[in-house]
């Protein structure tokens, strides 16, 4: 019986593949077995793509045999994709009933770049419907359990992708982050979650929630792995006009340069009233670790932080109200027949969308309506500009910001029924999206036995710097070794 | 605001004037669609064959701007004397309809690609100057085929998305037009410009050029506009004219009978010759425009605009004026010759190839135009070609062949093609101008037609024609008609 690689990193697996200690096929079998062992409890997977994965794994083994050490880093490594990312011929639902049965006839750019490296796709992961939520409870296919405590939420919206990594099924997964949907679940599941600068990773093939905010990024066990995945998926794409043509510096070159002499800012507005003492304690300890590594730490202010949430909940719903108009039952997915075109639209969308999606479509439609546009949408755009400008001026003084990712640790399923209470989950992650900045959540210990995340934020296109700070912390703290109890089940 | 104040033009004896503004949608002649690589040749293609994930609006897809479409829109705007602001952006126009795959149309709202243009033209010898509010760029929708003939009776509809995403310009005119004649001429002239600069094929029938009209009535001298009615579904110049005449009369009758007009959209029904209400103001959509987040704004710097301006060909107005002065043509002939760019290019090529300006004008506006219309092939794409036509006309001018022969050759070669000079030699079609050879034939004809000779000598001038005809017949049309006339008159007097 081959040694189990469940819970190991991409770097470990890649090395073992090259050393002949395992094969892509064995890694895949391992992943499938572990997935089937734990998924009844965490419900992280929607589509399972075992046949496709086996074909990919065999091809990867052949490629490894030929290319050896020269094979791409992700060749033969299993991956799971959030179900808002399209993959040719594989059912994609965005966790919604409305596009059930939709088989995309094309593959998105980020996913294609993984496939080009020889990635092995074991399935599509559960998420909040159309990526709208912070607990993964808004999925039409049921909630996702947190591998640290399956009664608790894994965060959202990329809860399934976070849980799949935290449970050790795959060493990495892709998620999408519109207001914190990678970083917040990463914090709640003890994984690394990285949201690159807006425009760094092509959105082509990502089912849009809010186009000006969405960004694809990885979940991993380590910052190094996050850098590897980012390096694979980032870069200009002619199919996405918002993807940046500016040259990209490799995140791997400077990953180990450390933080000595770096100036780190601690934004005082991020230590909010609702911040749990345990979270505050872990984050403050983490900041001390960074100080100990030679970084200077100073308090800074981002005064408009408290306007972020309101701004976000106008802009994101406005864009989603338009982005989701294409789900009309005419060309694909659910269609409910009715006596007239209007009734068919109403019946299809009424039956197909869940309550949170409907709420946001209504919010956005209202905010864009004639007579309300100036008061809501236009004003929100102005505030967004102010928020971005505040970050810019802070980054004249400091190289990066460090703060908590989520005000709380993972909460119990069903605990936050009030939408506004749920929206507060993202209060510390949303401003980063509004300003288009790179942000990462890296595990920084436990509070009451549940993971806490440290967020590192950098200036636009300084993705490599964000990874470098997070890596320095992770290496010094030993937090990279953190694994959920579900990983232990396989190893044992 | 109107660029040019139009003088009031009263609807005869009523005290009212009509105020008309036109919105023209013109598909751009680009190879690929507005936001994807699909072909724009949607018209003959089998339904839904010119589609891809992007123009089908599949989840996860994104638009990528067509450079050629932007350039052709800037070219159009410059041809219509518009300003090109340095910054322009795209917006989403949101509404639900099955021919709109994304549930929104990518269009331009408050920062269009161009504004403040002008189109000037003559109507009944008077100059009309119509402001062009803006020319902006958007994408076309798909088309629906309703089962059954009438939409309200259709049990089902079929969606064809071949046309979805074809680049479309919206050219918004100021309400500077006052009569149906002016409105028709505006569309005629606008179409002419679009075709001259090669951005649109000008087909109203196929819908690659579409026109909507806003029309209202007001008391002559009033500065406020009356209640505006939008008219849609006019698919020809004639329809534009008829629909506006109808609508002006309808509105006049309502106002004169003390009624009030409602702001609404009305459709022109060609077969019934009337407009019918489609949608009232209360039913108007709230399109919830907002900036398209998938497309960065466009910055069109001066250098770019000047590069595009350099691509502008001579426009029909300028060309007409030049033809008048350079070739000594009448205003009428010059206008006729510059109707289309191809025709005027052909004319200049003929003159350049040594055909006299007047002869070239007569033939181009006469027999060549007749054939071009009948065959639906312009002369430059005909079998004869412009150089063949030049050779033919040079032979006419040199007296090598006569007009009759030339016409016959033109008819034949226009379709089949061939070298006219070689054919004249092969078939012996050269004009008979040899006086002694013709004199013998003339004498024979006089001898054989004593009655006609007597008629002519008795004062019936037309009898000469029949004698000329006889000579022509005897020479198989090759005789020099002028010379035959002269010879006949010498012999039988008159």
Image (tube, coloured by chain):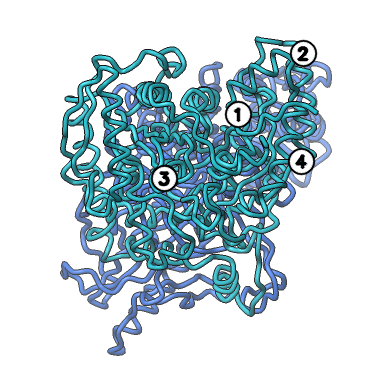
The residue shown at (64%, 39%) is A169
Question: Quick check: marks 1 and 3 in contact, CB under 8 Å?
Answer: no
Question: Quick check: marks 3 and 2 in contact, CB under 8 Å?
Answer: no
Residue on which disc 2 sits: A65
The chain shown in blue is which? B
Q: Quadrant of residue B32?
A: top right
Residue B107 is left or right of residue A259, and the answer is right
Residue on which disc 4 sits: A50
Residue on which disc 1 sits: A8
Crowding at dot 4, Cα within 10 Å, few <14 / some 14-19 / many 20+, comes out as some
* CA separation in Å, label 1 and label 4: 20 Å
Q: Are marks 2 and 4 on the same chain?
A: yes
Q: Given the image, what chain letter belongs to the residue carrying mark 4?
A: A
The residue shown at (42%, 56%) is B93
Q: Is residue A153 above or below residue B64?
A: below
Q: Give the secondary structure at mark 1.
A: loop
* CA separation in Å, label 3 and label 4: 29 Å
Q: Quadrant of residue A284?
A: top left
Q: Are marks 1 and 2 on the same chain?
A: yes
Image disc number at residue A184: 3
The residue shown at (42%, 41%) is A183
Q: Given the image, what chain letter belongs to the residue carrying mark 1?
A: A
Nearer mark to the viewer, of 1 and 4? 1
* CA separation in Å, label 3 and label 2: 39 Å
């Amino acid at each position: 019986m081959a040694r189990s690689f469940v819970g190991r990193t991409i770097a470990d697996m890649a090395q073992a593949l090259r050393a002949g200690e395992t094969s892509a096929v064995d890694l895949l079998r391992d992943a499938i077995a572990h997935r089937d062992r734990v998924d009844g409890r965490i419900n992280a997977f929607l589509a399972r793509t075992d046949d496709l994965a086996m074909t990919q794994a065999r091809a990867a083994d052949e490629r490894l045999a030929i290319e050896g050490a020269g094979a791409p880093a992700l060749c033969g490594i299993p991956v799971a994709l959030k179900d808002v990312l399209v993959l040719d011929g594989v059912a994609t639902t965005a966790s919604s009933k409305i596009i059930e049965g939709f088989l995309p006839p094309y593959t998105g750019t980020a996913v294609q770049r993984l496939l080009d490296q020889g990635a092995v796709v074991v399935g599509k992961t559960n998420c909040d419907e159309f990526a709208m939520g912070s607990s993964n409870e808004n999925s039409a296919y049921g909630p996702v359990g947190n591998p640290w405590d399956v009664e608790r939420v894994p965060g959202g919206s990329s809860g399934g992708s976070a849980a799949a990594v935290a449970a050790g099924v795959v060493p990495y997964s892709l998620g999408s982050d519109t207001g914190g949907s990678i970083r917040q679940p990463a914090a709640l599941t003890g994984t690394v979650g990285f949201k690159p600068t807006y425009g760094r990773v092509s959105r082509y093939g990502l089912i849009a929630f809010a186009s000006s905010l969405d960004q694809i990024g990885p979940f991993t066990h380590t910052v190094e792995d996050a850098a590897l995945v980012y390096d694979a998926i980032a870069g200009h794409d002619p199919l996405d006009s918002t993807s940046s043509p500016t040259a990209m510096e490799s995140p791997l070159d400077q990953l180990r340069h450390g933080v000595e002499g770096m100036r780190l800012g601690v934004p005082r507005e991020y230590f909010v009233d609702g911040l749990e003492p345990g979270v505050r304690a872990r984050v403050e300890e983490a900041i001390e670790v960074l100080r100990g590594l030679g970084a200077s730490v100073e308090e800074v202010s981002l005064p408009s932080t408290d306007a972020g949430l309101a701004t976000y909940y106008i802009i994101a719903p406005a864009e989603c109200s338009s982005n989701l108009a294409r789900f009309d039952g005419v060309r694909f997915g659910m269609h409910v027949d009715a006596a007239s075109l209007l009734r068919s639209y109403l019946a299809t969308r009424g039956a197909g969308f869940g309550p949170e999606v409907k709420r946001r479509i209504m919010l956005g439609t209202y905010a864009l309506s004639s007579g309300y546009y100036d008061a809501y949408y236009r004003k929100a755009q102005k505030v967004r500009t102010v928020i971005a400008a505040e970050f810019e001026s802070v980054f004249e003084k400091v190289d990066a910001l460090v703060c908590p990712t989520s005000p709380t640790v993972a909460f119990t399923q069903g605990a936050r029924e009030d939408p506004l209470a749920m929206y507060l989950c993202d209060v510390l992650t949303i401003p980063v999206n509004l300003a288009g900045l790179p942000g990462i959540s890296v595990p920084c210990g436990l509070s009451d036995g549940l993971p806490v995340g440290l967020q590192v934020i950098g200036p636009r296109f300084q993705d490599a710097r964000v990874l470098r700070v997070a890596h320095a912390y992770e290496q010094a703290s030993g937090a990279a070794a953190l694994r959920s109890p579900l990983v232990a089940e396989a190893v044992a | 605001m109107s660029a040019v104040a139009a003088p009031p033009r009263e609807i005869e004896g009523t005290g009212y004037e009509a105020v008309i503004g036109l919105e023209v949608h013109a598909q751009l002649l680009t190879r690929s669609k507005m936001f994807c690589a699909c072909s724009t040749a949607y018209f003959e293609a089998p339904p839904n064959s010119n589609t891809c994930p992007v123009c089908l609006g599949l989840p996860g897809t994104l638009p990528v701007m067509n450079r050629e479409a932007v350039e052709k829109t800037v070219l159009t705007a410059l041809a219509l004397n518009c300003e090109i602001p340095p910054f322009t952006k795209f917006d989403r126009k949101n509404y639900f309809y099955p021919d709109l795959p994304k549930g929104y149309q990518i269009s331009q709202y408050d920062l269009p690609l161009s504004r403040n243009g002008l189109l000037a033209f003559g109507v009944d010898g008077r100059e009309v100057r119509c402001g062009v509010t803006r020319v902006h760029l958007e994408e076309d929708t798909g088309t629906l085929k309703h089962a059954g003939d009438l939409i309200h009776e259709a049990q089902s509809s079929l969606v064809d998305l071949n046309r979805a995403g074809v680049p479309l310009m919206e050219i918004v005119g100021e309400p500077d037009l006052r009569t149906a004649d002016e409105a028709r001429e505006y569309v005629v002239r606008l179409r002419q410009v679009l075709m001259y600069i090669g951005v649109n094929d000008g087909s109203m029938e196929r819908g690659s050029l579409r026109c909507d009209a806003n029309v209202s009535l007001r008391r002559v001298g009033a500065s406020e506009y009356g209640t505006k009615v939008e008219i849609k579904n006019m698919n020809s110049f004639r329809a534009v004219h008829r629909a506006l005449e109808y609508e002006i009369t309808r509105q006049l009758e309502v106002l004169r009978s003390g009624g009030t007009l409602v702001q609404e959209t009305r459709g022109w029904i060609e077969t019934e010759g009337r407009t019918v209400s489609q949608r009232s103001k209360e039913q108007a959509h709230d399109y919830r425009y907002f900036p398209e987040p998938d497309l960065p704004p466009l910055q069109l710097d001066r250098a770019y605009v000047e590069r595009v301006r350099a691509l502008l060909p001579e426009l029909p107005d300028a060309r007409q004026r030049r033809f008048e002065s350079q070739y000594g043509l009448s205003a009428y002939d010059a206008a006729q010759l510059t109707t289309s760019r191809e025709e005027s290019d052909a004319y200049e090529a003929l003159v350049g190839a040594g055909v006299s300006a007047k002869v070239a004008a007569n033939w181009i506006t006469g027999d060549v135009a007749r054939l071009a219309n009948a065959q639906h092939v312009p002369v430059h794409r005909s079998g004869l070609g412009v150089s063949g036509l030049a050779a033919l006309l040079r032979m006419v001018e040199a007296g090598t062949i006569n007009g009759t022969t030339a016409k016959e050759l033109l008819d034949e070669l226009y379709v089949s093609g061939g070298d006219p000079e070689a054919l004249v030699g092969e078939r012996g079609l050269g004009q008979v101008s040899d006086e002694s050879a013709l004199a013998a034939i003339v004498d024979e004809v006089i001898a054989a037609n004593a009655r006609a000779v007597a008629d002519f000598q008795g004062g019936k001038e037309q009898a000469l024609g029949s004698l000329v005809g006889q000579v022509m017949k005897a020479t198989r049309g090759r005789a020099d008609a002028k010379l035959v006339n002269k010879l006949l008159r010498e012999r039988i007097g008159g």
